[in-house]
Amino acid sequence: MEGLVVSDRAKKTVIVESEYTTFLKKYERSLRNTSRIPAYNPECINAKTGDTVAIAGTRRLSKTKSFVVTKILKAGAK
């Protein structure tokens, strides 16, 4: 999955936000939603707020973390 890092305040954790659309059959419209996924941020990658990153699923690392940042696709404005 790909997404944008919106928070890096927690130690070794980033919040990645990704957009997706769902189709509402009743109204025949598409609805844009966002999901916020906590992901482990390894020290070798060290993603910051504003970066576009790729994340992959892994074993459960804590109560909320089940994803890990694999690489930075686009560095954010600094």
Image (cartoon, rainbow, N blue to C red):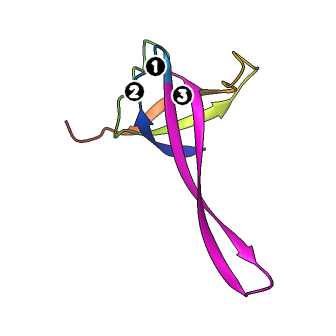
Q: Which amino acid does label 3 sit on?
A: Thr
Q: Does the magenta stretch include residue 19?
A: yes
Q: What residue type is labelled 1?
A: Ala
Instruction: Give how far apart the Cα atoms at labels 2 and 3 are.
Output: 10 Å
Q: Earlier in the sequence, mark 2 or mark 3?
A: 2
The residue wearing badge 3 is 70
The residue wearing badge 1 is 10
Residue shown at 39% from the left, 27% from the top: 47
Q: Where is residue 42 in the image (x, y as percent from the top left)?
A: 49, 15
For the N terminus, the image quarter is top right
Q: Position of residue 59 (x, y in %)?
A: 76, 20
Give the image quarter of residue 75.
top left
The residue wearing badge 2 is 47
Label for residue 26? none
Circle 1 residues within 10 Å: few <14, some 14–19, many ≥20: few
What residue occupies the far left of the structure in this picture?
78
Q: Which amino acid does label 2 sit on?
A: Ala
Residue shown at 58% from the left, 30% from the top: 38
Q: Position of residue 46 (x, y in %)?
A: 39, 20
Say which element carries label 1: loop
Circle 3 residues within 10 Å: few <14, some 14–19, many ≥20: some
Q: What range of the chain is rendered magenta? A: 14-41
Q: Nearer the viewer, mark 3 or mark 1?
A: 1
* Image side of residue 55 versus residue 44, left or right: right
Give the image quarter of residue 58.
top right
Residues marked 1 and 2 touching at CB (< 8 Å): no
